Amino acid sequence: MDPHLLRTYVTVARLASFSEAARELGYTQSAVSQHIAALEQDLGTPLLTRRPVTPTAAGERLLEHAGPLLLRLDAARADVARMAAAPEHGLTLAVAPTALGPRTLAALPAAGVTLRVLARDEIPAAVATGTADLGLVDGLAAPSDPLRLPDVAPLTTHGAGEEPVCVLLPRAHPLARRTGLRLGDLVDARWLDAPGAGLPLAHLRAANGGGGFRPALRYEGTDLRTLTALAAAGHGLTLLPRTAADGVPGAVAVPLVAPRVVHRVELVHGASLRGAAATMADRLLERA
């Protein structure tokens, strides 16, 4: 399949409009229609209904393949461009909010840094496509176990640190005086669902080996201070690395004692590192 045709198809399906896709891609509407017709002819099946513009069953299946395929192409282009280009003096670092701990802050260069706080699932793609030089992703893991990251491109990962995790509770919560909490005892508690800022509830379910952990409130953002304020105000519990949970006004951080998991941070980068990115990686891994 011609990737130009595939990219046009994905844009039309996303916008549900031939004219809007033409405007975004810089083509005429006639050219967009020709791209879709050529792709449908190549695959031997209709991919879109026209009124309204929606994917057919075959089109939906193609969309499942198209995202990873186009991402791989963008990643290959970015990887070759990095090798051919002169070393950059600046550094773009993509981080999950809870990965930006004291160790990372201490390793940052004094100048020339662009910091992008992203949802953790977006970071490998940002590094793969060259919109970030380095990435820091995090999650729950057994001690010394690597994280499971999406396979978006050939990326290199290094463990950059581990620390205990705590449940953040309002100061007046009945469990706030405990010296430790078991995750299995909190399955039916009120939880904050904040996949972009805190540790996702899916990680808790996986660590506990089952379901539960129903959200009382969903926060769609990446600001850690907002998340901790919601927890302190009693809108739900959240699980955080100890350094992020300690010292939150109006809240208590109680260590998680079972199961035996840690908050793990991993450094993600492409095949080669040069300039400021190499220096930061060396500092961070030396501290780890």
Image: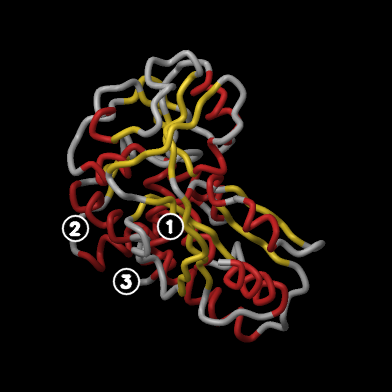
Categorize mark 1 by other alpha carbons within 10 Å: few (<14), some (14-19), many (20+). Answer: many
Identity of the residue drawn at 51% across and 18% down: 171
How far is mark 2 from mark 3, CA to CA? 14 Å
Q: Where does label 1 land, which residue?
A: 8
Question: Residue sitting at 60 percent across and 50 percent down?
Answer: 101
* Residue 252's disc number: none
Residue 182 versus residue 274 in the image, above or below: above
Query: 144 or 121: which is nearer to us?
Result: 144
Residue 276 place in picture, x, y as percent: 72, 73
Q: Which residue is mark 3?
A: 1
The C terminus, quarter of image: bottom right
Tell me which label, 1 or 2, sits earlier in the chain: 1
User: Residue 114, how many percent across, how many down?
Assistant: 71, 57
The answer, for residue 253, to whether it is visible in the render is yes
* Residue identified by numbered label 2: 45
Judged left or right of residue 211, residue 216 is right
Instruction: Inspect the image, locate mark 1, and give the three-letter code of the amino acid beneath it.
Output: Thr
| Sooner in the amino-acid sequence: mark 3 or mark 1 | 3
